[in-house]
Amino acid sequence: MKVLPTSISLALTALLLSPAIAWSQAKSAEKPISFGIIATSNSNSDDYKKRWQPMLDELSAQAGVKISAVASANIVDDIRDGKIQVAWLSNKLALDAVGTGKMKVFAQMMKDDGSSGYSSVLLVRRESPLNSAEDLFKSPGTYKLGYGDPNSTSGYLVPNIFLFKKANIDPVKHFKSVVNQAPRANFLAVANKEVDVAVNNTEDLELFKKELPDKFKDVRVIWTSQTMPDHPILISRDLPEATRTKIEQFFIAYGADKGNKAHATTLKNIRGLSGFRKSDNTQLKAVSILEMHNEVGKVESNASLSADEKKKRLAEISSRMQKLNALIASPQ
């Protein structure tokens, strides 16, 4: 029996195995994909999953892979663990997600008017004696505040930097009480007289105006922040390139055909959107600066830390922010 040379034998083996390898790779590319939504409450998360699902069903068909919306209270940890491959996040959480090295920004939300920005606001009851943030600061220990989640850009980071720190106010010490809640809970807390003032944002207010008109007429805005970039959509770097390309192209094209009424309805239901525009990690530069100021402020105002401990922690913040800024300095 004639024995084939080793090189030829290996080549034939590779040739025979290649279909199996290709099949295995194709099967791995077909693993279900999770579209992450930050969970602020069970009812809020379930509502947003329903709003996104028609779009995700169509994306599943085009990409050839099952894509489902999932809510997570620890979304950055789930991204780090590979449990979430595409996500809709606040700028603050997007910064954390990009920092894991697992994700990158590829799209940004657009509203009905084509704009891509939002502002933080302070809400009070219509009959409230408060007419400005300055009025609020004149009476320490008097008012109850509805604050945002510490992971929220509009609910926490923006008002903390541009309002409270600017006025040298520590909310926990200044207000009679402080409760951290999602935008809808804060809106209802003001309307229902559970708090005197609450943080919110212009995007969610537009939704509440349409969905809760009877409550909306009972509140008003006394402070508005500068405009921040609208929410980004992120995708995992670990997905096969072909799959990433299909998903990215789908998002940018969705809503571009203004004659597609089904797309228009879905986008409007999600968050009063008209579509998505291309974006990248550089969108997060502004929030990176805010986050650095926020972290530095926490250390500098911590009276329990010694001078050496503060120096050490500030150095750690500087090192961490340098690494993060390298990821968002240019399009990735």
Image (cartoon, grey):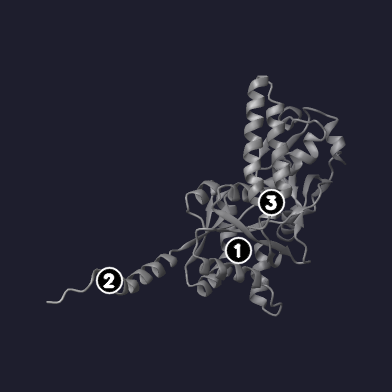
C-alpha gap between disc 2 and disc 3:
47 Å
Q: Which residue is mark 2?
A: 13
Q: Which residue is mark 1?
A: 51
Q: Which residue is mark 3?
A: 329
Indicate the quadrant where residue 255 lies.
bottom right
Residue at 60% across, 71% down = 250
**Three-letter amino acid code at the position of disc 1:** Arg
- In primary-sequence order, the first of circles 2 and 3 is 2
**Three-letter amino acid code at the position of disc 2:** Thr
In this rendering, the answer to whether 37 lies above or below 316 is below
**Three-letter amino acid code at the position of disc 3:** Ala
Indicate the quadrant where residue 213 lies.
bottom right
Verify CB contact (< 8 Å) between mark 2 and mark 1. no
- In primary-sequence order, the first of circles 1 and 3 is 1
**Left or right relative to 76: residue 326:** right
In this rendering, the answer to whether 136 lies above or below 329 is above
Crowding at label 2, few (<14), some or many (≥20) Cα neighbours within 10 Å?
few
In this rendering, the answer to whether 199 lies above or below 59 is above
Query: Which of the two residues, 235 or 188, is positioned nearer the viewer here?
Result: 235
Q: Is residue 210 visible?
A: yes
